[in-house]
Amino acid sequence: MKYEDLLKSGRIRKEDVSQKEIHQALDRAERDLKSARRFMEQDWDWSFAIAYNAVLQASRAYMFAQGFRPASSESHKNSFAFMHLALGREYAALMTYFDRMRAKRNRAVYEEAGTVTETEVRNLLKKAEDFVETIREKLGKER
């Protein structure tokens, strides 16, 4: 699959995104990491959802910087499909992991509370912290 395939299928669209919007998405990712850490001891489901959102916001920032935006329908899924392509094989396993966490977050938030374990939250939060830093570095190199 290529960017063109995502464009043709309507999963992403080409768009000029301002530097301000890119920075805002990265700032939201950082805010979400802090919030996820704060909620860790209170509510694993919610901490998990917030850590997941940090990954999503960092992905959106990277997407924006490349001149793309996800379609509004299934935007989370489309963002991760884009990131699979954008980051390539080196990050394929990590992006697959985040996509699985997308489905888990959806269940925890919309279907069945109490399904997230402490280990899952801690694993996701660590990977989210590393990912946000990686995206920040990548964007720093590209600006």
Image (spheres, helix red, strand yellow):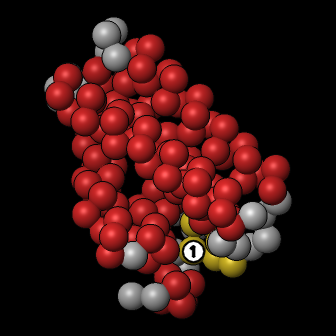
Seen at 44% across and 49% down, the residue is 131
Residue extending farthest front: 141
From the viewer's perspective, is 69 left or right of 121? right
Q: Which amino acid type corresponds to the residue marked 1 in the rendered image?
A: Ile
Residue extending farthest top: 42
Mark 1 = which residue?
12
From the viewer's perspective, is 26 left or right of 53? right
Q: Is residue 123 visible?
A: yes
Q: Is residue 34 above or below residue 120?
A: above
Seen at 35% across and 65% down, the residue is 91
- Which residue is nearer to you in this view: 66 or 46? 66
Q: Quadrant of residue 1?
A: bottom left
From the viewer's perspective, is 107 left or right of 91? left
Q: Quadrant of the C terminus?
A: bottom right
Q: Position of residue 51 (x, y in %)?
A: 41, 34
Q: Is residue 23 above or below residue 29?
A: below
- Which residue is nearer to you in this view: 84 or 107? 84
Mark 1, secondary structure of its residue:
strand
Q: Position of residue 90 (x, y in %)?
A: 33, 70
Seen at 41% across and 44% down, the residue is 130
From the viewer's perspective, is 121 left or right of 18? left
Seen at 43% across and 38% down, the residue is 129
Q: Quadrant of residue 135?
A: bottom right
Q: Quadrant of residue 80?
A: bottom left
